[in-house]
Amino acid sequence: KELRLEHDARLEDMFLSKRMDWLSVLAVNSESLPVERVKRVIKRFVQRHEGKLLLIVDEVDDCRTPSSDRSRVARGITRHCAAVRILSGTVASNSLLHLWAPFEILEHGALGFERFTDFKFRYAEYRQTTTRGGRTYPTLDRYRNEEELRAAVARWSSVVLRSDCADLPDIMEV
């Protein structure tokens, strides 16, 4: 509790500092985005720098679920930013449907759909599955229109390979 109070006092000093007007960086890990205290700090920071922010979301695949708190907070911040960049090595590792939320952080409607439901039914087909108890629910059957989706993603993407980076140290094997 004492450490938290000290931390809060330092944050307050930061917000009152004149130096904050010319250069500011607020680094927040994605796991803390849903935390109320963190959201309050982000809100104050955004208000102080309205329209001058660059948002960089590294490992944006942490925000792959459209309805998650992480995704909603990140999307909310983007409305106040001058520029947004997203980074990931595995943005759609398990499902093509995981593409919508990260690209929505990048720009509203980036992949051509303002609602996840419309995106989902354009790129996935579902079939009804029945449980032993007689209840039915939709399950993913297959993906469709994959080339179209690849083209939409390509408009916003670039790939940097390790071989493209001459100054990286060698990989150490353990």
Image (cartoon, helix red, strand yellow):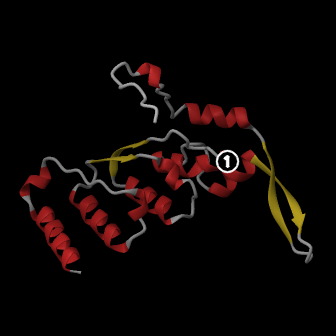
Where residue 50 sits, quadrant-wise, is: bottom left
- Specify whether residue 108 is in view: no
Is 16 rendered above or below residue 140?
below
Side (left or right) of 96 relative to 162:
right
Residue 137 quadrant: bottom right
Q: Which residue is mark 1?
A: 95
Pick whichever, 172 or 87, lies toward us: 172
Name the quadrant of the N terminus: bottom left
Total marks placed? 1
Looking at the image, which residue is at 27% across and 66% down?
Answer: 41
x and y percent of residue 113 in the render?
Answer: 61, 48
32 displayed left or right of 147: left
Q: Residue at x 43, y 61 (%)?
A: 31
Mark 1 crowd level (few <14, some 14–19, many ≥20, 10 Å Cα) = few
Please state which amino acid type lies under the numbered disc 1.
Ser
The image position of residue 140, as x and y in percent, is 79, 54
**Residue reaching furthest front?**
174
Task: Residue at 25%, 65% (x, y): give it.
Answer: 44
Q: Judge from the rendering whether residue 85 lies leftward or rightward of residue 19; answer left or right.
A: right
Q: Nearer the viewer, residue 74 or 60?
A: 60
Image height of 132 relative to 77, above or below = below
| Position of residue 33 measured from the top left corner of the image (x, y, whole percent) | 40, 63
Camera-side residue of 153 and 174: 174
**Residue, far bottom:** 1
> Vertically, is 68 above or below 2?
above
Query: Which residue does the image show at 16% across and 73% down from the upper left?
Result: 6
